[in-house]
Image (cartoon, rainbow, N blue to C red):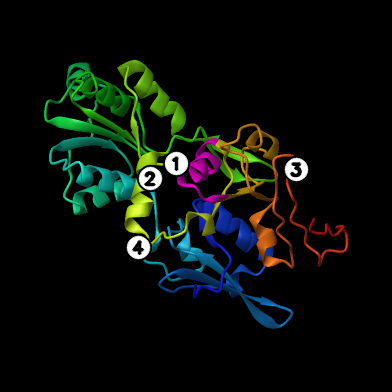
Amino acid sequence: ENDPFDFHLTVMNSSHLCNLVKALRVPHMINITVQPSFLYLTFPKSNAYHNIVLGLKFGYVFQSKSCLNCNLCSDHIVNPIKSIIWYLKKIDFRDEAFAIVSSACRKNFREAGIRLTEQPNVSEINPAATIKEVLDRPSVKAVIVDFDVNWNWSMLALAISCLERKDVLYIAGPTDEWFQIQALPQIKIMGPGPLLNVISAQSGRQPILCAKPSQNLKDYILDKCNVTNLKRCLFIGDTVNQDMKFASICGFLKLFVGTGCDTLEQAQKEDDSCPDYYIPSLGQLFSDLTIQNVNVSSISKIVDSSCPDREKINNK
């Protein structure tokens, strides 16, 4: 009741903030500061400073903070690794795990008291030693798959070997098939989804999901964050299967951004992915614009009224 803002915005993709910065054309003049509940972005416009407030009730993923004056703390960030650690703590997991994750995430697991088995050490000149490295390790009671740029055959082989035992937990983070790097011209790279599918297909197992769109990530957010009114939470995303469907699972309002791999038409095909709001690019949030509510039959546009080459669309 004391909150002056209509919505709390949640951005779960680091590229979104980068797009905002590019849209301003003066990224060196942006200051980002964090208050207990909100992220404030201050930028110059018409020789005056304006603020945009992005809610941090759930967290903000921004990995490139070195390029901005960004004062974020760990509590303001939500990512799959935190969700996985939370889940393991919830089920009182005390055994050893094999994790296909980045070196930074391995550190997160160890700091949380979760024991990790060593990565397989293979040799091109010693086939016998290589085979031994990828055979089942009885001490492993969980296989955790997130995202690691150093994925290789030996990691996949060891994960599949361990998952032959049905008592071994199979836990996964992001399942994205593609990562969008740039909107125009479009540049995208393969995500972790296809490699995760290899493990699932060859092991005959389906993972316990802890990233978008999963019940576990929702439970983590509701457990760790002060969420009192789901319909006052606006979830921003640019993917159909991950972002929009996760927002539906949570009961949040959905804002679909048109600069991702998926299109607005794809988002409208199913009820659980159809957005409540649409914006062509998050960069337009820094303009004089109007967000219009949408219904099933039509998606409202967000129009920058300060641009002479655009026709203003009035609210209906």
Q: CA distance from mark 1 to mark 3?
A: 26 Å
Query: What crowding class fits label 1: few (fewer than 14 Cα within 10 Å), some (14-19), or many (20 or more)?
Result: many
Q: CA distance from mark 1 to mark 4?
A: 19 Å
Amino acid type, mark 4: Asp
Q: Which numbered circle lies on residue 169?
A: none
Horizontally, residue 303 falls left or right of residue 4, namely: right
Q: Dot 1 corresponds to which residue?
A: 212
| Nearer mark to the viewer, of 2 and 3 | 3
Query: Which comes before the other along the chain, label 2 or label 4?
Result: 4
Query: Which comes before the other along the chain, label 2 or label 1?
Result: 1
Q: Residue at x 26, y 47 (%)?
A: 85
Image x and y of residue 265, in percent:
70, 35
Q: Quadrant of the C terminus?
A: bottom right
Instruction: Report helix, strand or loop for mark 3.
Output: loop
Badge 2 vs badge 1, beta-carbon distance below 8 Å:
yes
Amino acid type, mark 2: Leu
Asked if residue 250 lies in the magenta stretch, the reply is yes
Amino acid type, mark 1: Lys
Q: Dot 4 corresponds to which residue?
A: 75
Query: Which comes before the other along the chain, label 1 or label 4?
Result: 4
Horizontally, residue 133 falls left or right of residue 100, namely: left
Chain part drawn in magenta: 241-253
Q: Dot 2 corresponds to which residue?
A: 217
